Image: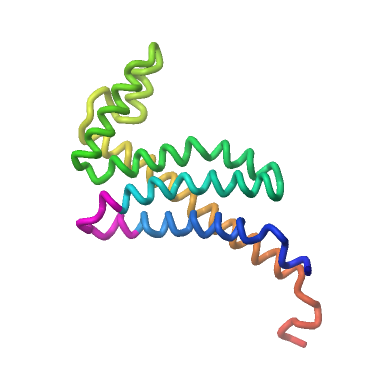
Amino acid sequence: MNRSDPPHSTPKVALVGLVAALAAVDLVLLVATTSRTELLRLLLAVGAFGVPFLGLILGLADRPLYAVGAVLSLPLAALYAYTGLLLPWTQLSFSLGQAGLELLLAVPVLGEPLATALFGGVTLGQATLRASFRYHYAIVALGVVGVAAAVARVGWRRSDFAPSGDSPGN
């Protein structure tokens, strides 16, 4: 087995591919309106939890650092999924938003400031949509940056292993 083909590269490619696919579909949903938006958002929410799952598998198979990253990415995946489900602002979105808001408001002392930060206030409204949009697409941007960094790293590593006689000038 040569160095450019590590034994655990398939889960890494799957992880980067899943993040790239989630970001791509989400960005398409940003500009295209479809009658299936709610279903697509639900599929994106389920798919978001595949990212920590694949990271955990990588952590068990390759390096424990991936497992730590998977555990740390779980709140981001949950926030991505939740805010993505709020964005179509359908009956399902409103019900999910109301349930989340009530759960936060039930937390003593921190409930109201958290509700204001996450929902734009203590009631659902236009501020909730703005906050959901900001948080959701901030996480999408992080995913795009992560995919770009992973692809750049792979390209950089492969160029380090290229034989010196294969340069275009020779």
| Residue placed furthest toward the right | 164
Up the image or down, 119 lies above or below 147; here it is above
Whether residue 29 is in magenta: the answer is: yes
Residue most extreme to the bottom: 170
Q: Is residue 163 magenta?
A: no
Task: Identify the magenta region.
Answer: 28-39
On the image, the x and y values in percent for residue 137 come to 38, 47
Q: Nearer the viewer, residue 122 or 94?
A: 94
Q: Nearer the viewer, residue 13 or 28?
A: 13
Q: Percent x, y for residue 156?
A: 68, 64
| Picture quadrant of residue 112 | top left
Q: Is residue 77 left or right of residue 151?
A: left
Where residue 11 appears, as percent x and y from the top left, is 61, 56
Q: Name the residue: 61% across, 56% down.
A: 12
> What's the coloring here?
rainbow
Q: Residue at x 22, y 42 (%)?
A: 89
- Compared to 40, does 71 lie above or below? above
**Relative horizontal placement of residue 76, taking residue 58 as reference (left or right):** left
Q: Position of residue 102 (x, y in %)?
A: 29, 22
Q: State left or right for residue 105 relative to residue 54.
A: left
Quarter containing the C terminus: bottom right
